[in-house]
Image (cartoon, rainbow, N blue to C red):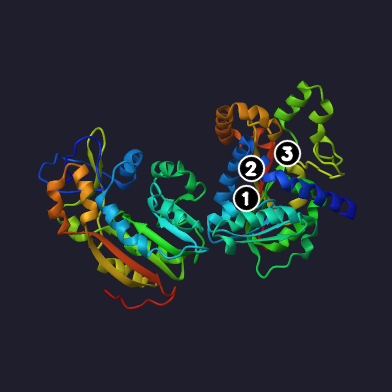
């Protein structure tokens, strides 16, 4: 249950257990992403690919709808949100290093804000579509996060949350990367779907749907390129990504959790 | 404002509208100056806010803010500028976020809105052509919420680059044009457009009844003014370097008051 060795400096977001691991360096979220930022965009990642494959067809029409990428990092989703309709969209992240990489992307110019997801620098009831991709596990205080996300959501707006599936985490999948010096694990503690719903429910959001996504055929090439073809079949049996679709129903009324 | 001046103003900006987008926003200097203003604007105007833009020109700032989820009510006295702004907006998916209409800033009295704005701004030289700024200040006080921020970018009075350039070319009159107390005619205007260059102190006095001066900074301190674009195009990397220097020094005493433009931030006082 540790980050595994890979050849070269490449490393996916979430490493798979293969028994050949050296001891990784453990990093806090801020330090981890500061170190990860320069190479974050360089290597394909099966979990991100799987998430994207599921979500892209679900992204609503964003013309004239204000979208927010929470913990946007290097702007992976923000780039897609901007490209999908050139409607209003911004990304917020705490890591200056990740935002520097995002800022170098022409299409994201002026759309990035440095800020804390627990204290968003935005007006209430601003956004109609929000995405928080592989970030909730970095936030311990789920209730505060839910309350703050809900504050900036318009009534009726949609929020997509994804993270490493708790079952994958239980089997040793970790968020991390390998740089020139060592393997680095970024501190993450994925929340269960139930905990997520409970927190968002008390903040006035209801669960529309949630699903555990297993890796599949399209992700096979990423394993092959990383020289880890032998792990692919085993990896496919574990729900790798947790996807939750939440809807802001009312600022005042909490609704029953549907799970 | 009397009608001949208003008409001259309108004619000047209508004429400028034809080439404005090709000349200024696409120029090396225009881009770095606008970037410097946007950095400040992006800090002050957050997604979800609704702001008023005066002298919006071809709408480049309004569309930028709309891309960040800020709603903008944008006004300009030139119908040609507003046409260009609407054309710009039509190429985006942001049309519900910006409302472009013709309105002379000298006639702000006629602007009536349902709810006060979260902020207001005017970028570059538009306000330099408005003779009665106390009328603008009074109307802005009426139009924005208490605590709202106002960003006013105006052509500054002291531009060392411009002075050195014109002096070196034996044109002391042009070198000192911004210091004249009386309004002057811009170099390229064919009619009697009156331009004036109020200092930050003048602006503080004019806005004092309802606004508190929060700060100001130079825009184009070491970066040369747009009239030296020919030089800038020969060395865009140098301009980039100067823009970085500007970022560090443009808030410092002395430097904040010099530059091609000065960006002034006011706050609407409460109560």
Q: Quadrant of residue B261?
A: top right
Tell me which residue sits at (15%, 46%) in the image. Answer: A229
**Element on which disc 1 rests:** helix
Q: Are marks 3 and 2 in contact (CB under 8 Å)?
A: no
Q: Which residue is mark 3?
A: B156
The answer to which of A186 and B76 lies nearer the viewer is B76
Q: Is residue A14 above or below residue A257?
A: above
Q: Which residue is mark 2?
A: B25
CA gap between label 2 and label 1 equals 8 Å
Side (left or right) of B5 relative to A130: right
Side (left or right) of B214 relative to A188: right
The answer to which of A158 and B253 lies nearer the viewer is A158
Side (left or right) of A41 relative to B114: left
Name the chain letter of the residue that bears numbered label 3.
B
Q: Is residue B162 above or below residue A86?
A: above
Tell me which residue sits at (47%, 49%) in the image. Answer: A112
Name the chain letter of the residue that bears numbered label 1.
B
CA gap between label 3 and label 1 equals 21 Å
Count neighbours of disc 2 (C-alpha within 10 A) and say few if under 14, some if 14 to 19, many if 20 or more: some
**Element on which disc 2 rests:** loop
Q: How many marks?
A: 3
**Element on which disc 3 rests:** loop
């Amino acid at each position: 249950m540790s980050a595994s060795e890979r050849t070269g400096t490449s490393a996916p977001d979430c490493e798979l257990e293969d028994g050949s691991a050296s001891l990784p360096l453990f990093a806090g979220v801020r330090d981890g992403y500061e170190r990860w930022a320069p190479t974050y965009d360089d290597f394909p990642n099966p979990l991100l690919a799987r998430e994207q494959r599921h979500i892209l067809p679900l992204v609503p029409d964003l013309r004239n709808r204000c979208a927010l990428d929470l913990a946007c990092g290097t702007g992976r989703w923000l780039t897609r949100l901007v490209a999908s309709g050139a409607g209003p969209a911004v990304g917020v992240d705490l890591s200056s290093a990740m935002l520097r990489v995002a800022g170098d992307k022409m299409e994201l110019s002026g759309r990035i804000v440095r800020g804390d997801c627990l204290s968003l620098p935005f007006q209430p009831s601003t956004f109609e579509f929000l995405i928080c991709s592989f970030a909730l596990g970095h936030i311990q205080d789920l209730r505060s996060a839910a309350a703050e996300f809900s504050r900036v959501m318009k009534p009726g707006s949609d929020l997509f949350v994804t993270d490493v599936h708790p079952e994958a985490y239980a089997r040793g999948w970790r968020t991390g990367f390998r740089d020139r010096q060592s393997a680095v694990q970024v501190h993450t503690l994925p929340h269960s779907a139930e905990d997520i719903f409970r927190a968002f429910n008390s903040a006035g959001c209801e669960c529309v749907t949630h699903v555990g996504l297993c890796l599949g055929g399209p992700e096979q090439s990423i394993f092959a390129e990383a020289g880890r073809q032998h792990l692919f079949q085993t990896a496919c049996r574990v729900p790798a990504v947790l996807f939750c679709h939440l809807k802001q129903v009312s600022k005042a009324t909490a609704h029953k959790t549907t799970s | 404002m009397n009608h001949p001046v208003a008409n001259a103003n309108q004619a000047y900006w209508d004429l400028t509208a034809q080439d404005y987008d090709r000349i200024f926003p696409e120029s090396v200097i225009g881009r770095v100056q606008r970037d410097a203003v946007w950095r400040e604007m992006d800090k002050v105007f957050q997604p979800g806010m609704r702001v008023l833009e005066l002298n919006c020109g071809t709408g480049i700032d309004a569309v930028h803010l709309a891309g960040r989820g800020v709603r903008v009510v944008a006004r300009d006295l030139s119908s040609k500028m507003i046409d260009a702004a609407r054309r710009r907006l039509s190429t985006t998916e942001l049309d519900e976020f910006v409302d472009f209409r013709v309105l002379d800033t000298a006639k702000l009295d006629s602007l009536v809105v349902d709810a006060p704005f979260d902020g207001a701004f005017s970028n570059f030289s538009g306000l330099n052509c408005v003779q009665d700024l106390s009328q603008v200040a009074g109307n802005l006080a009426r139009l924005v919420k208490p605590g709202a921020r106002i960003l006013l970018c105006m052509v500054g009075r002291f531009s060392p680059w411009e002075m050195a350039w014109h002096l070196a070319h034996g044109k002391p009159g042009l070198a000192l044009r911004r210091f004249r107390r009386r309004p002057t005619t811009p170099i390229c205007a064919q009619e009697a457009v009156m331009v004036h260059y109020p200092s930050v102190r003048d602006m503080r006095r004019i806005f004092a009844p309802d606004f508190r001066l929060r700060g100001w900074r130079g825009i184009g301190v070491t970066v040369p003014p747009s009239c030296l674009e020919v030089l800038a195009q020969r060395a865009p990397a140098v301009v980039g370097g100067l823009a970085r220097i500007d970022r560090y020094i443009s808030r410092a005493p002395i430097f904040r008051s010099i530059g091609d433009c000065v960006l002034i931030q006011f706050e609407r006082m409460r109560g």
